[in-house]
Image (spheres, grey):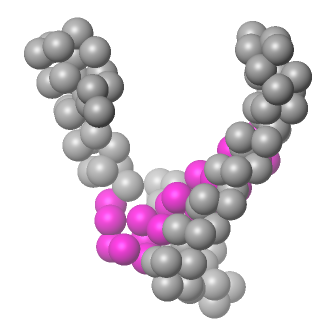
Amino acid sequence: MDAQDRVAQFVESNDLHAPPAYRLLDLTSELGEVAKEVTTSTGYGASPDEVSVAEDELGDALFALLALCEETDTDASEALETALEKYETRLAETGDAGSGE
């Protein structure tokens, strides 16, 4: 069983379904918590090499993302493969993985 299946099973067995918009808000909130930990652990950027993020905060963000994938009928593994292919193409064509936007 992969991570998305585990999240789907947990959501189903605990009746935690939510509309995709709420899942997106939850994901944004969880990423905000990760950003806060990075900000404070680096002294608000004074020590950028001292990044510290609690594993459970990253786990919360991952759960929220996988729950969003589940609610939108998106296969997270396929979405990741698509993204990796896109970045590989960009690297091959431009030498940079960024979109340039």
Q: Is residue 30 above or below residue 88?
A: below
Q: Give the range drawn in magenta.
A: 55-75
Instruction: Between residue 65 and residue 48, name the one nearer to us.
Output: 48
Whether residue 81 sits left or right of residue 60 in the image: it is left
Q: In this view, does 15 lie above or below 63?
A: below
Instruction: Between residue 9 and residue 37, name the one nearer to us.
Output: 37
Q: Residue furthest left?
A: 93
Q: Image quarter for residue 50?
A: top right
Quadrant where the image shows the C terminus: top left
In the rendered image, residue 95, in percent from the top left (x then y), is placed at 23, 9
In the rendered image, residue 54, in percent from the top left (x then y), is placed at 81, 38
Q: Image quarter for residue 46?
A: top right
Q: Can residue 50 be seen in this view?
A: no
In the rendered image, residue 36, in percent from the top left (x then y), is placed at 79, 42
In the rendered image, residue 57, in percent from the top left (x then y), is placed at 76, 47
95 in the magenta segment: no
Q: Is residue 46 visible?
A: yes
